[in-house]
Image (cartoon, coloured by chain):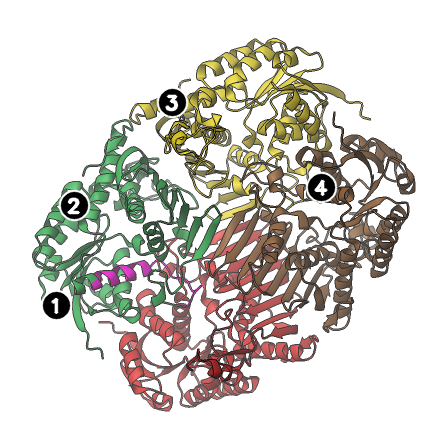
Chain colours: A green, B red, C brown, D yellow
Amino acid sequence: MSDKTTIGVGMVGYAFMGRVHSQAWRSVGAFFDLPLAPRMAVLSGRSKERTEAAAAQLGWDAVETDWRELVRRDDVQIVDICTPGDSHAEIAVAALAAGKHVICEKPLANTVAEAEAMVRAAAAAPPGVKSMVAFNYRRVPAIALARRYVEEGRLGEIRHVRAQYLQDWIVDPEFPLVWRLQKDKAGAGALGDIGSHIVDAAEFITGQHVVGVSGLTETFIKQRPLAGESAGLGAARAESTGEVTVDDAALFIGRMSGGALASFEATRFATGRKNAMRIEINGQLGSLAFDFEAMNELWLCQGGGGFERILVTEPDHPYAGAWWPPGHGLGYEHTFTHEIKDFLEAVATGADPVPSFADGLRVQRVLEAVERSAADGGRYTNVED
Amino acid sequence: MSDKTTIGVGMVGYAFMGRVHSQAWRSVGAFFDLPLAPRMAVLSGRSKERTEAAAAQLGWDAVETDWRELVRRDDVQIVDICTPGDSHAEIAVAALAAGKHVICEKPLANTVAEAEAMVRAAAAAPPGVKSMVAFNYRRVPAIALARRYVEEGRLGEIRHVRAQYLQDWIVDPEFPLVWRLQKDKAGAGALGDIGSHIVDAAEFITGQHVVGVSGLTETFIKQRPLAGESAGLGAARAESTGEVTVDDAALFIGRMSGGALASFEATRFATGRKNAMRIEINGQLGSLAFDFEAMNELWLCQGGGGFERILVTEPDHPYAGAWWPPGHGLGYEHTFTHEIKDFLEAVATGADPVPSFADGLRVQRVLEAVERSAADGGRYTNVED
Amino acid sequence: MSDKTTIGVGMVGYAFMGRVHSQAWRSVGAFFDLPLAPRMAVLSGRSKERTEAAAAQLGWDAVETDWRELVRRDDVQIVDICTPGDSHAEIAVAALAAGKHVICEKPLANTVAEAEAMVRAAAAAPPGVKSMVAFNYRRVPAIALARRYVEEGRLGEIRHVRAQYLQDWIVDPEFPLVWRLQKDKAGAGALGDIGSHIVDAAEFITGQHVVGVSGLTETFIKQRPLAGESAGLGAARAESTGEVTVDDAALFIGRMSGGALASFEATRFATGRKNAMRIEINGQLGSLAFDFEAMNELWLCQGGGGFERILVTEPDHPYAGAWWPPGHGLGYEHTFTHEIKDFLEAVATGADPVPSFADGLRVQRVLEAVERSAADGGRYTNVED
Amino acid sequence: MSDKTTIGVGMVGYAFMGRVHSQAWRSVGAFFDLPLAPRMAVLSGRSKERTEAAAAQLGWDAVETDWRELVRRDDVQIVDICTPGDSHAEIAVAALAAGKHVICEKPLANTVAEAEAMVRAAAAAPPGVKSMVAFNYRRVPAIALARRYVEEGRLGEIRHVRAQYLQDWIVDPEFPLVWRLQKDKAGAGALGDIGSHIVDAAEFITGQHVVGVSGLTETFIKQRPLAGESAGLGAARAESTGEVTVDDAALFIGRMSGGALASFEATRFATGRKNAMRIEINGQLGSLAFDFEAMNELWLCQGGGGFERILVTEPDHPYAGAWWPPGHGLGYEHTFTHEIKDFLEAVATGADPVPSFADGLRVQRVLEAVERSAADGGRYTNVED
């Protein structure tokens, strides 16, 4: 019934990220007055049967079993990459070369080299072709509000960044050796998966870059049961474990480009912390604090007083006005809806969406510096430009 | 692509409640494995132009400008009533008589008499025709979990219920005389609009009924500017106000059927409280506390210890398993998605959905007892059976 | 080593209140620059042996076994009454008649008649003889700061007072029938013991009086084991219980003299709440919230924002400057030290200490109105002037 | 009136630490049933007039202007050292040689060499002469309870320690160059003053030692106005500043002897954090969290659930039973009362009080390793045994 220009979307992958991206594509037009109406055109996955079932459930019009076909289709103008990190570069480079806009899940790639190739592909894409890496936490209204406050100078010169991403889903030593615990597939462990989010958030909120780090990583449980193998038989048991090849936890301290000190911790062993993506910023004039486990709240300190709990649901707060009245909170999925809204606006207006692939590459370089430092006895290591 | 049986939905009204119900109809099938696939068939509203715009934005296939036409349509099996309370009874009675399932926004009606008519209509509907009143807070996962804990006996005998619904949107005396502040349109003020929610939640969680109350109501600001009138001209100013004919705040204390004491407060004058729907239950063995402003958290006290903050996002928590991993919170809208999921299951299986119209009537009778008590010098007033 | 004028203190009673008052008399001079140096002269109690042991432990120079002797002594200028409520009136009246300053524990008396006699005695005392009722919560720095904020007009016109005093120490039905559960000794139950505190705090912070109430009281456990009796023998067990003659919980709603609505709840059955003396005030311009379980924090909302957590330990906060650097909190006992500091200053300067006996009487009248209302079906009952 | 053996105390210094120690000596006997009754015999300070005024206010019987005289006095059996760190070693060594028990404020000394001398002196002292370093945070009831829980195995194997000590008292660049900001007097900045507390607390709670660290320190404001100089005159202004020679903030990450990773941060630039001494411990079976700004609360997570807020005021909690009923919190000063109670018990029974001088030395070695690491580009640096 709308006469808006539609734009076709093709999504690669339909697991966790695919489900939440689908909800965003499905919902965004009902809440934001967009210049373009996204059409959920094609979903691709390797198994035809499972991809068809996912498309039916998630609301995609067609399926492909090869992402190359999806990239080629005329009814696809946007390629949304929701696969594990090891395939990001290949898909993104192909899609950009084909003149498709690309939104790619984080981390941008599993290696700095891949990320660099993606940045080059983005630069080489035809004019008007846009690309973006999906650090969704930037679109938590509270984090976007934090960014606004820093930009307005409310905190003055920034002295400290204190960021943690705490989870506990592999505390149990019997938890199996899923692909996320294998370096060849996942690239890194907690460092890449959740450490990347807090590095990006710290840079986004402060407007500064991480310039150097001292790092420490650990794998607490070095052998885990192989997933999917039969278990429980005595003799077979010893054979049924494999090596964990990524970090369980990563700690690093460092310096920001504007002179702030920063402390980061990413771990999957913080028992009782389910998704505690926490960040505190201290400036000369004020401070901010946030914890994703209470994602609708931002704590602001100013003028020598205490911390004020701001419920980030007011009409003038970022993104919040599009939704419900004050006090009616949003959830995890809305951060993706906001991201896609911003991406569609950039595509329509010709603006460059952020975070760009270059932003994603910079995060990758921070993570790489952490790994190098950890491998080199914690030595302070500069992040490459 | 799905071969599920579809069921047509017609929604009446597209304002605040219509927007959130639309999001629920649109999303429910992507997260819950339902026996029926809802089709967003028809939206009705009085203005053709505005209804068409709403339908385009919210994703409804067709429009009607008379709800009677919507009720009559063959492609509508479910009527979803999202209008103000003064039209609930007429629409619901007609829809039920026409053999349509009805889900109706709360409060069930503006008067006990209307609510009684609706209960009679529900009873007289053809076999298999279902009806439900949409007290969505029952489907906050934390509140559903609270109910489960009470049912399991974790709190023992209940001694206290302490419920508040605190908002602040009309604190400013210059806020205009919108329809919600006029008795002929809204039925009641804070008492009906938000007091109804905490009465229902208290009854739902405890499994007890409110049996008697002493009440007190107040209208702090008795005259307000008329909405939409030109203002600011000296002489005209005196004429441009009207009388507020509903309560700004209602307090009542009472007794529950199981022996607990209860305290309720509903107000739109609690500065700084945006949507603080709060409830605390104290039992002989334990306690529970909840505040909607932190809707993903339930506080549980047991065995003589302190209060434990439960993040209600675990796979075995009510509704939560259908969404995201632990620690990735839900928002306001999800309560409606859960409600519609339960309603669709009831329609498909023939179960009676709750809260029923009879449950809605009982809430209405509690509110009426509060009004009678307040008018009678606070005298303890029994709630009619 | 000091040449300050000393003033002799005689304290009656050495149980819970006597212990905390002793700590205040012992400490006050080390932190506040007082015009008078208190000397802990005499302690009285009925048992010579136990009183001597208490005096040795708590630091009193001499003992008496009859409070009348204490009142008569020349080395006593201040009488500090720490006995149960049934002896307050007799001791206070005698002390005032003897020209001694009196500080008396709350509630002022067990009955309105006794309290009235005490007010008359205070008025009839020789010039310069001072009296005060020890509602210590007024001297929590956070509550004194709340009073300051209201006085400064930061909240504007007050709309709501929401006060609760929640404890759980008699939840267990096997808890014995101590004197506090017997009306002839304690006067009232939760209503008098802790309800009195929240009524006084509400009046103190707002500067308004409670003018009328609708009340509800309950005794959940009507028979309890007699304290001190042998138990556990089958036949004897039935004989070994006695009747609880006071309320376990009291709820009341009412109106303040300035137009605010007020809600009060005092209970000993709020499982998990140990000493949750909580008060929230909503005004047209702002709000305040406090919970004694986090006694160093005051929450302030102003200007349309959220609630700011003020750590009430800054040098310019009431009483706080005398103690430690910011962020180094105080405890329960300090409220008594502050109270005694203010009392000594009033004695030295000739000012009238507050809360006065008249203030204590007014609280008593509110409690009596609650009891009359509860006995009269919750009817709204005016508080006597 | 008591026939307990008294023991004479001589205290050196009467500033912040002297005031709080005095309150502890004055109060301890009224709350704990001690084997020895402390007598506040002598206070020493350099200025006779000011020491006499302090003694009068704080309750000491006599004064000395040379601590050597205090150490020599027969009425002094315990020497309590409350001076800045640069004099700790000399006083402690002399007192121990004279056969006096010593309780010494933290950090034990300004250098590792001085701390080693003190440990040798403690070992060489006559039999039965006791020594203790006053890390008072060990005697926060919540921290002592945390230690108990870890000892009981409730957390299982420890994976993470996350400790911060955040203050903000020198955020203002106009704050003057007090002695605490000069290395020759204070030894170190935030690292020594408050970093020492969190290192000791982490070791105490976990029962593990810090074995190696990577550190980073910073002085944000390098020049500050000289304290006490006249200011405000144009030309004079440039001359009236001096160099800050200690750290403003120190961050370090490292490893504990039991395999845990640890993160520490000590700063005086965390705007809005007044005395946020925070520690979180994650173990395989559970977690603990604490923040001194809410010192009566300990958060415990166990068995896969959320965090429980324990109000550490129950009779069976460490130290708490000596004070008030549940829910009636303690303050900062009580940690010193507990410390002195434990010290007196050790002196009376012949037990070795903890933390010992050797414990204090170990903390000093951790701080020195941090400084070495920071000076060596963050290299991971082993803590000397």
Relative image position of residue A273 (x, y in whole percent) = 41, 46
Residue to which mark 1 is pinned = A75
In the shown orientation, is residue C97 left or right of residue B323? right
Residue to which mark 3 is pinned = D369
Q: Nearer the viewer, mark 4 or mark 3?
A: 4
Which mark is on residue D282? none
Q: Nearer the viewer, residue D156 or A5?
A: A5
Query: Magenta segment range?
Result: A325-345
Residue at image position (72%, 63%) is: C218
Relative image position of residue D345 (x, y in whole percent) = 66, 23
Tally the numbered discs. 4
Badge 2 and badge 3 both on one subunit? no
Q: Is residue A43 visible?
A: no
Q: Chain of mark 2?
A: A
Residue to which mark 2 is pinned = A115
Residue to which mark 4 is pinned = C341
Which kind of residue does numbered mark 2 sit on? Ala
Q: Nearer the viewer, residue A27 or A300?
A: A300
Which kind of residue does numbered mark 1 sit on? Asp
Between disc 2 and disc 1, whose residue precedes? Answer: 1
Which kind of residue does numbered mark 4 sit on? Lys
Q: Is residue B290 visible?
A: yes
The answer for how far apart the CA atoms under marks 2 and 3 are is 37 Å
